[in-house]
Amino acid sequence: MTLEDDGGHAAPIKRPVRWHILVFLLPALIVYTAVMILPLFQTLWLSLFNTVDGQPAFVGLANFKVLFGDERWAASFWNAFRNNLIFFVIHMLVQNPIGIALAAMLSIPKLRFAAFYRTAIFLPTLLSFVIVGFIWKLILSPIWGVAPWLMSLVGMKTFFAPWLGLPGTALIAVSLISVWQYVGIPMMLIYAALLNIPEEVIEAAECDGITGWSQFWKIKLPLILPAIGIISILTFVGNFNAFDLVYTVQGALAGPDGSTDILGTLLYRTFFGFQLQLGDRSMGATIATVMFLIILAGVSLYLFIIQRRIRRYQF
Amino acid sequence: MSNKARTSPIRTGAIHFALIAYTIIALFPVFLTIVNSFKSRNAIFRSPLQLPGPESFSMIGYETVLKQGNFIGYFGNSLTVTVLSIALVLLFGAMAAFALSEYRFKGNTLMGLYLSLGIMIPIRLGTVAILQGMVATGLVNTRTALVLVYTAQGLPLAVFILSEFMRTVSDDLKNAGRIDGLSEYAIFFRLVLPLVRPAMATVAVFTMIPIWNDLWFPLILAPAEATKTVTLGSQIFIGQFVTDWNAVLSALSLAIFPVLVLYMIFSRQLIRGITSGAVK
């Protein structure tokens, strides 16, 4: 990086070094590099080390061999990975369609109370996982009985079960709690994209007799595909480093019986230790590296394939 | 706009019905928590959906929380950490954004890309080395550690949003300032910063939410009693008082309250920020 002016003059005039550029950039650059980028690469680097005979030693890919080769490590890793994938799929299938539907309804011109609905539906997104997790734990608790009572109103009381406590349903229940909390984000981003569609396009569609549902499917949806791409990648990154909700609702062991264990909770237990398990920095760094590669793969897939394929309409 | 196809009363009715239904789903749990936090233990279980009346009204939960938990201290910690982090994110972020959007120099694009890496890659993945670094510098269990981490976490998005906005500030204005002999620093602080204030407010709100709500870093970097944030504090408090429903509901309500107040003040700003395309 040079700070001399090369600002497009035909004849290059030698100008003094522009120190102010450095002064403007430096604080952000130092904090960002020292606290974020360096530790990130240091963590990746640490995954290649382990303690041998009480001394830190370079072990190459041995940690990864343990993670994927050792029976117990591999079992808990693949369990966490599979759960994380299910967690993500539920978000994609439930959260994003609901978000799109809500945005489509809110963006109808001259809809009354639209601002109120928008504000209210976005509220849960601002609450911390701790609040959201405990509220739902209370509501779904058979001791309090709010959930069974609500279900009895619609005649479905017999279907009630302590979902959070059953290995078969706990993951779905936790995912749906997270969906409840975060539906506001896709709603807002899609809403913004829908508002950006020019009125002329909609009018032209109406002149051709395309209204209502078919207008949404044939005109609006293709135009908001870039925004849907963005919410998909945001969901992916958010889900694959999620931790707080599972920790709050099911504890660090991500019970019952590891059925809600995701990569974030596995990383926490491995690296920080929990109860009888001692913290293991090398294996923690190894899991963090795998998570980094998963997220990197997702982001690259989005940037280089999906985003290029989606046609952007310029108005 | 006055198109019949768009405003058939049945369709509008159905849409309002769907939106009201979802609004209830979104608000009901919060409502339920706050209402029950003001009731006696019996009333919580006997009639969870009733508003507190003269018989069922009770503040016992709040008394337990204020007596047993150090919530005021936790609030103080959260407030200090959040306010300091936002201030640093805004100042450093705006400075870097100004450098990137105002000057042409070699490496400008590369620097922009480097700073925006952090938008997609979560800082959490570096936790192992961050903890190591904080231990080495003796910053474990200090609020400084949290402020540093949150500043680094907030900077990428702040630089990205603010430099988009700064590109729209008129060049004539800045050049007029230069002709009047203002230094580059004066141009930044006196001319440009006041003009991008709306964008700064948007960035502040976006930065604030994940910091205030974070559980991961307080849990790992600053779990000591003296540095607990309100999110971690309520997590631990509720974990210990699981069976005391009054205390749990009151602690939850206390944690919701500041968010509700802030949301009522800033919701327009926040929603305008999102929908104006600040984050695309």
Image (cartoon, coloured by chain):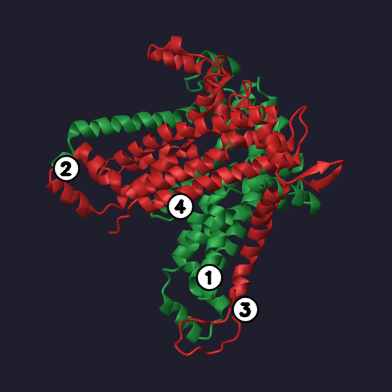
Chain colours: A red, B green
- The residue pinned by badge 4 equals A303
- Left-right relation of A150 to B34: left
Q: Mark 3 or mark 4, which is nearer to you?
A: 4
Q: In terms of depth relative to the viewer, which is nearer, A144 or A14? A: A14
Q: Name the residue under label 1.
A: B108
Task: Report the Cα–Cα distance between label 3 and label 1.
Answer: 15 Å
Q: Which residue type does callout 1 highlight? A: Asn
Specify the label residue A19 is tagged with: 3
Using the rendered image of the protein, determine whether residue B97 is visible from the camera's viewpoint.
no
**A142 and A242: which is toward the camera:** A242
First in residue order: circle 3 vs circle 2: 3
Residue beneath label 2, please? Answer: A210
Q: Residue B27: x, y in percent?
A: 44, 31
Up-down: is B147 above or below A239? below
The amino acid on which the numbered mark 3 sits, given as a three-letter code, is: Trp
Identify which amino acid the numbered label 2 is placed on.
Ile
Q: Distance between the residues labelled 4 and 2?
A: 33 Å
How far across and how far down the image is residue A201, in percent?
21, 52
* Callout 3: SS: helix
Chain ID for label 4? A
- Residues B97 and A256: in front is A256
